Image: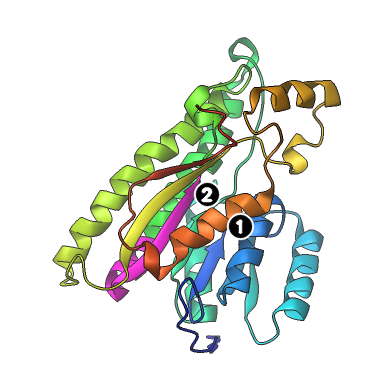
Amino acid sequence: MTTTQTYGGDTRAGSLAGRVALVTGGTAGIGGAISQDLAEAGAGIAAGYWHSGERARKSQARAAEQFPGQLFTLHEGNIGHADDCRRVISEVIEQHGRLDILVNNAGITIDRTVAKMTDEDWLRVISVNLSGAFFMAQAALDHMIERGSGRIINVSSVIGETGNIGQVNYAASKSGLFGLTKSLAKEALFHLKKADHPVGDGVGVTVNAVTPGFIATDMLATIPERVLDRIRGQIPVGRLGRPEEIARVVRFLAADESAYVTGQIWAVNGGLDM
């Protein structure tokens, strides 16, 4: 059943009223903060999740209280499977009537040194973090090109730039998002021209990436405090990042006003790569 929703006619700079955003891994951590920020800007939210159904439903209930009148839907799927990616995109378009913003945020880690890493350890991380982003974007781009507008934002990691002991699979997957982002950005412009949507007019279709540094989320919760102290000592601003600091950059890239920004990698890491 198709669900339609009106989000209002706010035309202020940075407003996302009338837009629909799909955030994979969008119910907690960085993804949860992104969903929150985009909803505050007026967007209807489709939040992807896998397994953590109770947490996802709590997130949906909170959103219903905070943003009455805005549609917040949940979509369970394993983005490591291409068919799940295509199904989720179809579900979002069916339930919201459109898809304007795709945030490829979901990711996993399976940390081992190269000597101990199994074939499955490698393939699983690549399939979720890199292949999943590709399959989601591939399905979303068809819809965006047809409509002549859209935003795709890939959430990478500073580890994709620096590498890290015990994270060769994760680093490779996050580094791969750089090439994916730049190639998709070029293809989006190519296909817009073919579809008779003049490049340079209106909102356009852009593809960008954000590379968080060390962010205070559950992913760091199991790291011993002495290790966290060492990490903080390496960060020029002297602290871990906050999820909402990533969300603010994603929100900018999702807005109509970012139409002149595409194929770019935005580092949000406290100066770690200086």
C-beta proximity under 8 Å, tags 1 and 2: yes
State the residue position of label 2: 81
Q: Is residue 64 above or below residue 5?
A: above
Q: Is 127 one of the magenta-colored residues?
A: no
The amino acid type of the residue labelled 1 equals Gly
Q: Position of residue 190 (x, y in %)?
A: 19, 57
Image coordinates of residue 170 in percent, x first then y, are: 56, 30
| Viewer-proximal residue among 255 and 107 | 255
Figure quadrant of residue 151: bottom left
Residue at figure coordinates x 56%, y 50% from the top left: 105
Magenta includes 144? Answer: yes
At x 42%, y 34%, the residue is 176
Check residue 42 in the rendering and tell me which mark sits there, or answer none: none
* Disc 1 packing (10 Å; few <14; some 14–19; many ≥20): some
- The image quadrant where one finds the N terminus is bottom right
Residue 29 % position (x, y)? 71, 51
Q: Residues within 10 Å of mark 2 (few under 14, many from 20)?
A: some
Judged left or right of residue 64, residue 144 is left
Query: What element does badge 1 sit on?
Result: loop
Give the magenta range. Answer: 140-155
Say above or below: 262 vs 19: above
The image's colour scheme reads rainbow
Q: Nearest the camera: 212 or 148?
A: 212
Give me the C-alpha separation between circle 1 and circle 2.
Answer: 8 Å
Across and down, in percent, residue 89 comes to 48, 66
Q: Which secondary structure lies at badge 2? A: loop
Q: Which mark is residue 77?
A: 1
What amino acid is labelled 2 in the image? Answer: His
Residue occupying image coordinates x 56% and y 23% = 119
Residue drawn at 59 percent across, 56 percent down? 247
In screen coordinates, is 121 left or right of 223?
A: left
